[in-house]
Amino acid sequence: MDQQEKAKVVAFAKERFRGLGDYDFLPSMDLDAMIDAFVSMDAEYMREAGVDQGGVYDDEAAFDRLFAGMKERFNQYQMYLMRMTEDYMDIFEEYLDSIDAIEWV
């Protein structure tokens, strides 16, 4: 994922997370940092899994990796991170669907 694509995903995710209303208690700077971390870690997972070269995106492996990474980086919000990781994955899937980039296997 290049920087331009990452910026699109981050903007999409910020809009969706704020639209949920479930994370309004988070300081805006923290929510922005968390979304950026999700997108960066997910891009790293996809690169390592070879998704761009036809590799499979394993939802469970991606979730585990994102959740673990978020616990390391944002431990102060640990009680919200499982739900937030699920929401991120749903939002990212929604983004991919919006650009017609999902191939269901």
Image (spheres, helix red, strand yellow):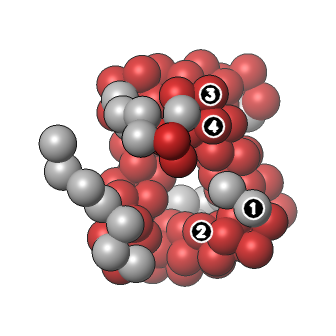
- Quadrant where the image shows the N terminus: bottom right
At x 41% / y 41%, what residue is drawn? 54
Q: Residues within 10 Å of mark 4 (few under 14, many from 20)?
A: some
Disc 4: which residue: 47
Q: CA distance from mark 3 to mark 4?
A: 4 Å
Disc 3: which residue: 48
Amino acid beneath label 4 = Arg
At x 73% / y 21%, what residue is drawn? 72
Element carrying mark 3: helix
Disc 2: which residue: 9
- Looking at marks 2 and 4 on the same chain, the residue that comes earlier in the sequence is marked by 2
Amino acid beneath label 3 = Glu
- Looking at marks 3 and 1 on the same chain, the residue that comes earlier in the sequence is marked by 1
Up the image or down, 27 lies above or below 37; here it is below
**Contact flag, marks 3 and 4 (Cβ < 8 Å):** yes
- Looking at marks 1 and 4 on the same chain, the residue that comes earlier in the sequence is marked by 1
Amino acid beneath label 1 = Asp
Element carrying mark 4: helix
Q: Is residue 40 visible?
A: yes
Q: CA distance from mark 3 to mark 1?
A: 15 Å
Left or right of 80, for residue 41: right
Up the image or down, 82 lies above or below 19; here it is above
- Looking at marks 2 and 1 on the same chain, the residue that comes earlier in the sequence is marked by 1
Q: Nearer the viewer, mark 2 or mark 4?
A: 4
Disc 1: which residue: 2
